[in-house]
Image (tube, rainbow, N blue to C red):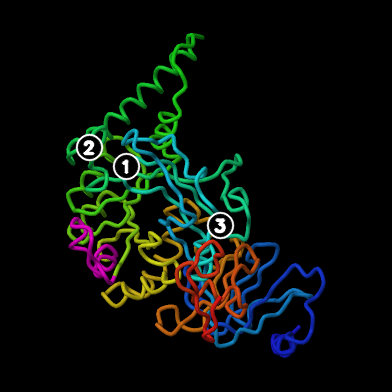
């Protein structure tokens, strides 16, 4: 069937019901931004059973018979955005009892029915790393979520091959974790406590190994040390909050000493030590804010951070740290980086594929490629235009946000508490109505 005939059929879709039981969706006419290849001006994206079936131009992609056709000429389609550091769902991690609590799982503290998840969908975010806070040297285990529509954490969690939720380990240094005992009072003490925790985990591993060899049992199971051993054997990556250049270098020293994998988050001073970060082959997930303040250690944050890291060869991603940046404004952050010298290609990669790599999910998300999860965003225009709006967000071939729907539009444009019946604030729709 010729593409022209298919496009003509697509024009009357608004009055004809979609084929019953159709497993495929074909999006035709949009400008495609695949991330891992050149942009396609007159593109065709075909998704089937939650995966991308084909990506290409109108002359190279064959559309399956019976596919639902979506005429999206004049629009832009790009991969779903990957937020490597968020706090949507109101998560909490460690308490005040100790500065290092690796046994805590943020899995057990997320409200997936929170309005924050719908706001993230409205911003085009499809994959997110939900983290506990940064008030501890180690505040617990993070979790990677797909922003599917679901009522329980189990419906959103990304699972490994053994069916366990995937996630990293949240660590922090600098000002946040410095408090009265048992918390450290200085930066030097902070590093010493972390170093001792890793040494103790290695001793625990050796003791358990000896007992298995000897057929004895005397060492009690320690969930915290088991989690630390996942960090040390590389199966659980460290997501490390850090700002000042000296704190960044402290993390690099610990990484070199113990061999764990790490992603540096925030890194306000990264531009001062970009070459050192590159030499250590450590990725950075950065945040750009246009109203800085409130944290002395972040005083030197610069819009040029992304450009400096990119020039040094560092893998650069972005994050919202929601509410620090509203999830609905995620695209805007990359635009600010481009304005300060980051390349367009690098910024688009930072929103998508870089984050996927930082979460070990690059085989599933981050680009428009055959075989990957059908996570993508339909935009009204160029992703870096201030006039562009997220029109639709799709996760694994299912539409989870549609700006044309009144409820979804409320998530997109409403103020704090909009669409959440548990709050008293009112959110305004485009037409000036309130709910």
Q: Which residue is mark 2?
A: 180
Between disc 1 and disc 2, the foreground one is 2
Q: CA distance from mark 3 to mark 2?
A: 38 Å
Sequence-first tag of 3 and 2: 3
Sequence-first tag of 3 and 1: 1
Q: Which mark is residue 146?
A: 3
Q: CA distance from mark 1 to mark 2?
A: 12 Å
Q: Residues within 10 Å of mark 2 (few under 14, many from 20)?
A: few
Residue plotted at (52% across, 79% down)? 379
Residue plotted at (35% across, 58% down)? 285
Near-viewer residue (108 or 14):
108
Near-viewer residue (228 or 181):
181
Residue furthest to the right: 20
Residue plotted at (47% across, 76% down)? 38
Relative to residue 302, is residue 43 depicted above or below? below
* Residue 173: % across, % down: 26, 45
């Amino acid at each position: 069937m010729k593409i022209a005939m298919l496009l003509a059929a697509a024009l009357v879709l608004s009055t004809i019901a979609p084929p019953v039981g159709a497993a495929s969706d074909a999006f035709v006419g949009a400008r495609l931004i695949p991330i891992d290849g050149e942009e396609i001006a007159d593109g065709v994206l075909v998704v089937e059973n939650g995966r991308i079936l084909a990506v290409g131009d109108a002359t190279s992609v064959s559309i399956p018979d019976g596919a639902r056709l979506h005429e999206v000429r004049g629009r832009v389609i790009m991969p779903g955005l990957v937020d490597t550091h968020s706090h949507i769902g109101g998560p909490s991690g460690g308490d005040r009892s100790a500065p290092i609590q690796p046994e805590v799982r943020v899995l057990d503290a997320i409200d997936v029915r929170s309005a924050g998840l719908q706001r993230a969908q409205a911003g085009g975010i499809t994959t997110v790393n939900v983290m506990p806070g940064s008030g501890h040297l180690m505040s617990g285990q993070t979790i990677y979520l797909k922003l599917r529509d679901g009522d329980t954490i189990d419906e959103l969690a990304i699972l490994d091959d053994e069916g366990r939720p995937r996630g990293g380990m949240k660590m922090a240094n600098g000002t946040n974790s410095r408090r009265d005992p048992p918390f450290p009072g200085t930066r030097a003490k902070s590093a010493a406590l972390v170093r001792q925790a890793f040494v103790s985990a290695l001793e625990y591993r050796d003791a358990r190994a000896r007992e298995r060899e000897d057929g004895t049992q005397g060492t009690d199971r320690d969930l915290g040390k088991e989690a630390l051993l996942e960090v040390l054997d590389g199966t659980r990556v460290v997501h490390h909050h850090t700002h000042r250049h000296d704190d960044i270098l402290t993390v690099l020293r610990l990484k070199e000493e113990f061999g764990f994998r790490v992603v540096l988050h925030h890194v306000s001073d990264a531009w001062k030590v970009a070459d050192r970060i590159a030499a250590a082959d450590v990725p950075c997930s950065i945040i750009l804010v246009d109203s800085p303040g409130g944290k002395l250690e972040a005083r030197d944050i610069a819009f040029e951070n992304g450009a400096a890291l990119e020039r040094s060869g560092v893998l650069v991603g972005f994050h919202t740290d929601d509410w620090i940046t509203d999830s609905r404004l995620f695209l805007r952050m990359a635009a600010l980086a481009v304005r300060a010298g980051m390349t367009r290609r690098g910024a688009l990669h930072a929103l998508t594929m870089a984050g996927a790599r930082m979460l070990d999910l690059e085989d599933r998300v981050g680009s428009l490629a055959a075989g990957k999860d059908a996570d993508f965003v339909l935009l009204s225009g160029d992703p870096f235009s201030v006039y562009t709006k997220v029109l639709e967000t799709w996760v694994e071939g299912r539409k989870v946000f549609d700006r044309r729907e009144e409820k979804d539009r409320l998530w997109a444009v409403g103020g704090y508490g909009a669409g959440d019946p548990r709050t008293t604030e009112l959110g305004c729709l485009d037409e000036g109505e309130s709910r």
